[in-house]
Image: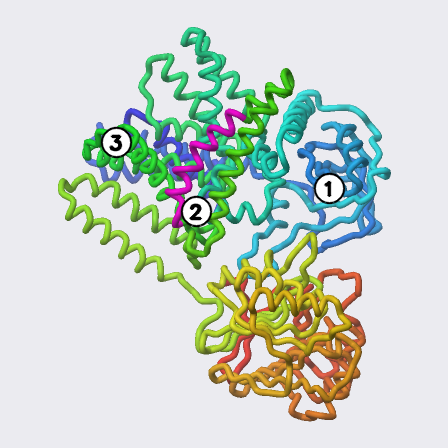
Amino acid sequence: MKDFPAIKLSILFTAGILLSKFFLLSFLFFVAVSILTLLVFLVYTKSPKNILHLFNNILLYISIIFSGNLIAQINNPHYDLIPENIYRVKKVKVIGKITNIELARRGEIVFDVESKILNLSDSLINDNINFICVVKDGEKKLDSLYNKLAVGNTVYFGGSFFKGNEERNPGEFDYNKYLRSEGISGIITAYDVSKIKIVDTKKNAFVNTVFILRKKIDDKIRALYNEQSSALLRGLLLADRSEISYNTKTEFINSGVIHILAVSGLHVGFIVLIFAILFGRFNIYLRSLLTMVGLISYLILIGPPPSAFRAGIMAIVLIIAFISNRSTNLLNSVAIAAIIILVIHPYELFTPGFQLSFAAVISIALIYPPISNAIKRLEIQNNFVKNILLFIGVSLAAQIGTMPFTIYYFSKVSLVALFTNLIIIPLVGVIVGIGILSVVLGAVVPVIAFYFSVVNELIIKFIFLVIHATGSSEFSFLRIRNFSIYNIILFYFALTFLVIFYRRFNSNIPRIGLVILCVCNFYLLASFDNYNLLPDNKLSIMMIDVGQGDSFLLKFPNGKTALIDAGEANYYFDNGERVILPLMNYLGIDKINYGFVSHIDLDHYGGFISLIHNNKISEIYKPEIDSTEAKDVRFEKYLEEEKVPEKYYRKEIIKIGNVRIYVLNTRKFKTNSSNNRSSLLKVVYGNSKFLFTGDLERRGERYYSKMYGKFLDSDVLKVGHHGSKTSSGKEFLHLVAPKISLISDGRQNKFHHPSKMTLDKLEEIHSKIYRTDVSGAILLQTDGKIISKVNWREL
């Protein structure tokens, strides 16, 4: 530590940035603490010689912490943002400067705009407000616009404004919060290329040159490779993962190789190796200089993420140390890279990329040496086997170090990561090398480039086969819930304790005992802040926010679960895959025991398709098949193909522990309306009663009101048809007399649900109204006596 002061400096500087999250230090504070420190040492230190030395050290430490805090204050961005309460505006007009253009995607162009004039909600705003603009139109029109746009152009266009998605359900990523932290107010989507006008062709020469180069490389990749291969190579070579599908990214996470999709130390290492080989004929100084220039040029080209920037700084530090015959230390190099990054952008400290990349390298520096020494003590004669074990050791060290952040951000840890990394990492080096070579040759000798691309595609295809085989299985990873910042700190404390004391034992038995002791203590202490959002011995009912649709998750006191509807699924968004399945994972629900399809409308049954495909539904209840409805026939066929047991609604009682579900539908009620065929379910637990109506309309309400009368009385009503005026008749509402009314609808939906008429009628009977468009997911819980609303955001 004494020989490598950058380590100490980076720790203190980082502490100052962390403190900025809680309070900002002033210069007067710095002076006051310094004086107080001097007085303390004057009083309590007897040796005069030590006073000045200790005071200087303490003052230095305080100065570094203060510098980190001050840098954080100076770099704390203050953006002009539109008000949070503006969610969607259909007709927006913007005049602004293009600050960045992303590589073309399938069916859309994306660029960032700093607006000069913004017409929003009939008000004119002249502040410089930043937006992401997404243009969707025909392929030819998009290509034409893409080739005209340049960074620095001023453009005029119109479209629909959306703010980023917030955390609408437990465990969701708050995209709106992320955008606003980056100074972006939201997204404007334009659907007509012809209405986008370039009003000023002035360009940012340097940034635009980099973009043109990126575009040309991307064009070569697209020309040489198929869709799947080009999407991966764009991620590996140009740090653009936009065309890698959601399912593919999930499989990479499950396989423990998601890190290869982020341009990081691995890729920088490959790039340095390629440049070192290319410039191998030059003397050491010129070769090193050209390698550094090549590396810096590559980082500029990709607009380096923190992981790549960190690795680039480290590589340059190591090269300089090598050519100057100075000794270096991996931890010291990491510390230098951290200081440089944090001085430029201190709030990178709080980003997943920064945390994961630095955790990986630090853990390799600390954990790999004892692993390496243990392997060397085995005295393995076969160099191939020995190198394989050493490689596994590096991978294991990195995974141990990054495990807390991986669990915190993904709620899972891969069980096959060592195996997949052993195969994938060397192959990634090969495809990066061939990819660069094919792009270069594509500009000179296209025929030869084609043969290289064919070979590369075969390797990439093999990689995807391995990832799919290892990442699509439920046995490839372990889900871990409730992993908090407290758990991260505890993990690293236990790991530090283990690293320090492990080396003090000379035999294996006490070392094994130390490991067991650390693991057991971590497991015990980590459980202190655990909580269960859906506790046992209570009936929990969550109205999931699926936009303009219905979905209700029920967990019964005996631990079994039910799902009433699953929201819509279409080409652009599948609520089953993107909302309900992640929610189940977050809540630790492996399978839904009872799936209730209220009726065959897409915004109610659509999400069930992907849930059934992923084997998440044990059995389905639905209305009797309507052979005149093609979608109903297709759904029945799908259930048969997937071998999911199904039952039709009929008047019966479903007993689930102490809970009773009364199915009130009867075959005697004849109707041609899909809405009026909706299930009518009454859930009873003790004195608590809940009534679910699907999209039942007034005719159905009148029929069941006559049939059941006061039996419909319930504490909670799922208001029919998203609060439409076609439902919630007065007679029906007075019979149900709900204390709480739940309305599931999308924010600013095109149907204008819920109807003011319905809201007025609910207010007349003094019912408390909860809506997903206003509050997101709503969670109610009861012990059979009292029904309480749980604020899940505060847990």
Q: Main structural element of the magenta stretch: helix, strand or loop?
A: helix
Please give the label number shown on residue 405: 2
Above or below 783: residue 246:
above
Mark 2 surroundings: few (<14), some (14-19) or many (≥20) residues within 10 A: many
Measured along the vertical axis of the image, is residue 663 above or below residue 674? below
Q: Residue furthest right?
A: 194
Q: Earlier in the sequence, mark 2 or mark 3?
A: 3
Q: Nearer the viewer, residue 448 or 731?
A: 448
Residue drawn at the location 47% of the way across and 82% of the way down? 657
Q: Amino acid at mark 2?
A: Phe
- Which residue is denoted by mark 1 in the rendering? 107
**Gap in angstroms between the C-alphas marked 2 and 3:** 42 Å
User: Magenta includes 433?
Assistant: yes
Q: Residue at x 59, y 65 (%)?
A: 641
- The one nearer the camera, 599 or 642, is 642
The amino acid beneath tag 1 is Gly
Secondary structure of the residue carrying numbered label 1? loop
Q: Position of residue 528 (x, y in %)?
A: 36, 62
Q: Is residue 361 left or right of residue 457?
A: left
Q: CA distance from mark 2 to mark 1?
A: 34 Å
Is 478 included in the stretch rendered in magenta?
no
- Say which quarter of the image contains residue 710: bottom right
Q: Is residue 563 left or right of residue 382?
A: right
